[in-house]
């Protein structure tokens, strides 16, 4: 149980550190004169919104309950 708790805390700390690093970074100035962020948070947000339907589709396909179109 402690191992799983440690894994979850580690994931949260890693994502949190990437978010803080990206939010502190200065992105103003001429094109190409700044570092790109580590994470594209728009893509992360979109993936989180579609995660439940994606998991349902993959589970149905894995268990053989997928609807054929």
Image (cartoon, rainbow, N blue to C red):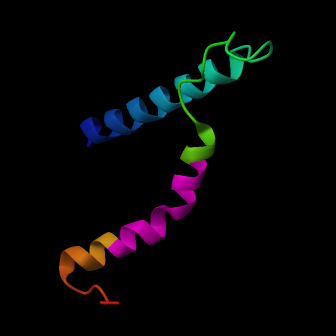
Q: Nearer the viewer, residue 28 or 12?
A: 28
Q: Nearer the viewer, residue 36 or 16?
A: 36
Residue 27 placement, left or right of 55: right
x then y, percent, for residue 47: 51, 54
Q: Looking at the image, is 35 positioned above or below residue 9?
A: above
Q: Looking at the image, is 25 positioned above or below residue 14?
A: above
x then y, percent, for residue 9: 42, 33
Point out the stretch of residues depicted in magenta.
Answer: 45-57
Q: Residue furthest right?
A: 29
Q: Nearer the viewer, residue 3 or 57?
A: 57
Q: What type of secondary structure mainly makes up the magenta span?
A: helix
x then y, percent, for residue 2: 28, 37
Q: Quadrant of the N terminus?
A: top left
Residue at x 46%, y 71% (from the top left corner): 53
Q: Nearer the viewer, residue 1 or 42?
A: 42
Residue 1 placement, left or right of 69: left
Residue 64 placement, left or right of 41: left
Q: Quadrant of residue 17?
A: top right
Residue at x 78%, y 13% (from the top left corner): 30
Q: Residue furthest top?
A: 33
x then y, percent, for residue 58: 30, 70
Q: Residue furthest front?
A: 31
Residue at x 55%, y 29% (from the top left corner): 16
Please count the marks in the image.
Answer: 0
Q: Quadrant of the C terminus?
A: bottom left
Residue at x 63%, y 22% (from the top left corner): 22
């Amino acid at each position: 149980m402690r191992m799983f708790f440690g894994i979850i805390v580690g994931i949260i700390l890693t994502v949190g550190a990437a978010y803080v690093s990206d939010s502190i970074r200065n992105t103003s100035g001429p094109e190409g004169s700044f570092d790109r962020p580590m994470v594209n948070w728009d893509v992360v947000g979109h993936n989180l919104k579609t995660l439940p339907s994606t998991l349902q589709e993959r589970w149905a396909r894995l268990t053989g309950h997928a609807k054929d179109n």
